[in-house]
Amino acid sequence: MVEGTKKRNKIFDYFREKEELYAGGVAWCPGCTLELTARFVPKVLGKDMVLVGCPGCSAPVFYGQNVGTWHRMTYYSCLMTGVPSSATGLARYYKKIGKDVTIVCFTGDGCAADIGFQPLSGAAERNENIIYICYDNEGYMNTGYQRSSTTPLGAWTSTTPVGVAGKGKPTPSKNMPLIMAMHGAVYVATATLSHLEDFAKKLLKAKEKKDEGFAYIHVFAPCLMGWRIEADSSIEVCRAAVRTNYFPLWEAENGKFRLTHEVASPKPVTELTKLMRKFSHLKEDGLAELQKVADERYALIKSLCDASK
Amino acid sequence: MAKAQKGQVRVITGNAAAAYGAMLCRPDVATSYPITPMSEVAEQLSAFRADGLVDTEMVEVEGENSAMNVVTAASMAGGRVFTATSSWGLVFMYDAVQQASGFRAPVVMAIANRETPGILAVSGGQQDIISMRDTGWIQIIVEDCQEILDSVIMAFRLAEDFDIQLPVMVNYDGFYLSYLATAVEIPEREDAARFLAPLKQQPERPKLVPGEPLSCGTHGIEMGFMELRYKHCAALERATTKLDEIDKEFGEIFGRSYGGQIEEYRTEDAEIVLVTSGSATGTARTVVDAKRAEGIKVGLVKLRLFRPFPRKRLAEALKGKKAIGVIDRSVGFGWNCGPMYMEIRALTPEIGIIPMLSYIDGLANLDITIPHIERVIDEVSAAAQGKPYQEVTWIPMEE
């Protein structure tokens, strides 16, 4: 690696993996936050792990085709109903033969919150030695932007279209990170790409605690195509989600909640919604309802953090 | 032939026999999730674990779908795995069942057969295995509790064989066998280990190694996919004669063998043949003896291997016979006949055009009785003499 004259960003200090793990030329959509997450996670965790995933936006690269893949990692692919259960099988077998292995599930929200929720809940309850990372792009972005249970209130998707009668999604999103925390998981955190150091610390903490049991990290990962975002502003959207408290950054370690990045003066959610077109049909009342959901959720997490002090 | 190894004889249920069979093979990972009528398998395995008889990692999953995913993944990592289910549990793991065979994961699964689909029937029937016909698994159907235990042990030998590497289902009639307590000889652990030892002489099967660049379960496209399918089917073909070999070897060690793919009873000089599977075979054997005493030259074929279908062995057994009757404990939707009958009919080019009669009986815990089987033999016998016959008979509907 050529040493630059500019001071190196301290995020590199968190990288445990020096090797480039992806084949040259591998790319998802331009500006894709999943791609950045998929590249960032193994850099921090190191490649000595087994990644478990399923069909979704990450699959085309992770799965490979026939006898070739586009990465140098150990990957186990299964169906959307089987990610945490497959990871359980791997973790239990390696435990049986006395092999110390980090098992990392890497899926979107459709798998985690919808079709694969039962095995996720089961694995969390059994306190399996698994790290589950959910990249939440708030819908089935891979199959053409259909709604999932993490799609927010009022959002346009291809199955909650806007028209004379349609007003976007009629119900708020499933509060996944909190649901997972309520399972009593050893470690639960939220993270996003605008706050990489925070993200890296959480990944390392999850790995550090993996022998104690189940860890879950919920990553806010906007989809430029599905949310109708300009290609150069994906990180800006992540930052806005944090600054508006739409997606607060917190962690729960053995049931103790803590805000890892407290926003001094949060902006209204319109600062986030204006960056994309999936909310562009919302009028004042719709935006007010979305603000209300964000406020209530923030108040809830804040009270949990305060109670943990 | 060496002296057969003796084990302890105990009175145990079919479910316990399945659990004992698994325990003797010392799986690395097993799952438990209850469903009637197989729950006892899960309980018994957990008890073995609690008593320190095995060091298997037992995963108390939250559903059958997860059970199959747990064991498939553990198998791909290199482990020996076991699970058991029944009926709707089997249906609930349908996607994972197909994934397991596509992955060529040597999973062994015991199934206490029970009715599906449609109206809920908490009762015996083989419809659940029929729905698994095209999953790419090896399907063995057994007759009694001893055969359950022995077949589970044989299933590990077959599944993990380097030339096979396919998952195996060991099917036994729910209710009829699952809860039936009979004397079962439980082999000694060392003997079971000796029987499985040849697997260790074989090359190691491919497995997932953490940190190694390897992706398990890639997108198979075009020729890559075609080749995998071709090899999968070829492995299934190899499993037919492999089961015969394994069954023979089992007999040499334990003094019990079951004929491999099919078991023939008094077929050699038989003019007509009855085909059965599962627990009804015991009844059929009694009736065959009685009819023989009356002078009717009837033989019996027990279908043990349902997938891959034992085409060659069946054709050899049925060739030259004058008529055949097949009793099914399930239905072939859209054909209005028994599924096993349907498949045997497909052997017509090999066995010739003769009367073939389909009998549907014993659904949802209806008994396949001695009078039922007598009736079948009488009708098949009449058909063999050129009398007109009805192709498909739903026996209890005509009583």
Image: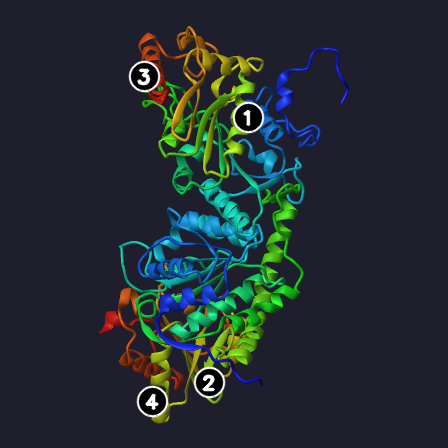
Front residue of A243/B270: it is A243
Instruction: For marks 1 and 4, give the one nearer the viewer.
Output: 1
- Indicate the amino acid at tag 4: Ala
Q: Is residue A204 left or right of residue A81?
A: right
CB-based contact (under 8 Å), mark 2 and mark 3: no
Chain to which mark 3 belongs: A
Q: Position of residue A114 (x, y in %)?
A: 40, 34
Whole-Å distance between the Cαs marked 4 and 3? 79 Å
Question: Residue at 31% across / 19% down in the picture?
Answer: A165
- Indicate the amino acid at tag 1: Leu
Q: Who comes first in sequence, dot 3 or dot 1?
A: 1
Q: Position of residue B14 (x, y in %)?
A: 36, 69
Instruction: For marks 4 and 3, give the one nearer the viewer.
Output: 3
Chain to which mark 2 belongs: B
Q: Inspect this view and state whether residue A117 appears.
A: yes
**Secondary element at tag 3:** helix
Question: Residue at 61% across / 24% down in the picture?
Answer: A14
**Secondary element at tag 4:** helix
Instruction: For marks 2 and 3, give the one nearer the viewer.
Output: 3
CB-based contact (under 8 Å), mark 2 and mark 1: no
Q: Which residue is mark 1?
A: A34
Q: Which residue is mark 4?
A: B290
Q: Which residue is mark 3?
A: A296
Whole-Å distance between the Cαs marked 2 and 1? 65 Å
Q: Which residue is mark 2?
A: B267
